[in-house]
Amino acid sequence: MNASVKGAVAEKMQLDALQAEAGGNAEVNLDVILDVPVTMAMEVGRTRISIRNLLQLNQGSVVELDRAAGEPLDVFVNGTLVAHGEVVVINEKFGIRLTDVISPAERVRKLK
């Protein structure tokens, strides 16, 4: 067994030991991560176009998306889908009203 494989095994064992120590009864102190910044993005829709068509886009061009009008937007945090919502206007600024929040268990399941 070479050194890099041994190191990988050692890291996995340490992670398993930490997970075993945490167990289901350990209290988690979330204060250490509450100020960590994340990127939140709302997606209206997507499309695939060729580079030729991309280069032909100019002011006034219309790009058809894969979503019908009235369908909810997707809300992503650091690239992970966390909710669906609808656009609202508040004091002349756009916002989003969450209509469906993905459960934490479902979000974790999608990461695997």
Image (spheres, rainbow, N blue to C red):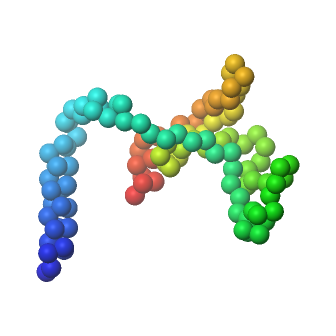
Q: Find residue 4 and report its horizontal and vertical position in percent.
A: 19, 73
Residue 87 picture quarter:
top right
- Image vertical order of residue 1 relative to residue 62, above or below: below
Q: Find residue 68 and report its horizontal and vertical position in percent.
A: 77, 48
- Image vertical order of residue 6 relative to residue 93, above or below: below
Q: Find residue 63 and report its horizontal and vertical position in percent.
A: 79, 54
Q: Find residue 51 and report its horizontal and vertical position in percent.
A: 72, 68
Is 90 in front, or is 21?
A: 90
Residue 9 picture quarter:
bottom left
Is 83 in front, or is 24?
A: 83
Q: Is residue 57 visible?
A: yes
Screen quadrant of the C terminus? bottom left
At a point 18% along the width and 61% down the height, the residue shown is 11
Screen quadrant of the N terminus? bottom left
Residue at the top extreme, as displayed: 91
Q: Is residue 82 visible?
A: no
Q: Is residue 53 toward the left or the right of residue 77 in the image?
A: right
At a point 73% along the width and 68% down the height, the residue shown is 50
Number of numbered discs overlaid on the protein picture: 0
At a point 50% along the width and 49% down the height, the residue shown is 79
At a point 14% along the width and 45% down the height, the residue shown is 21
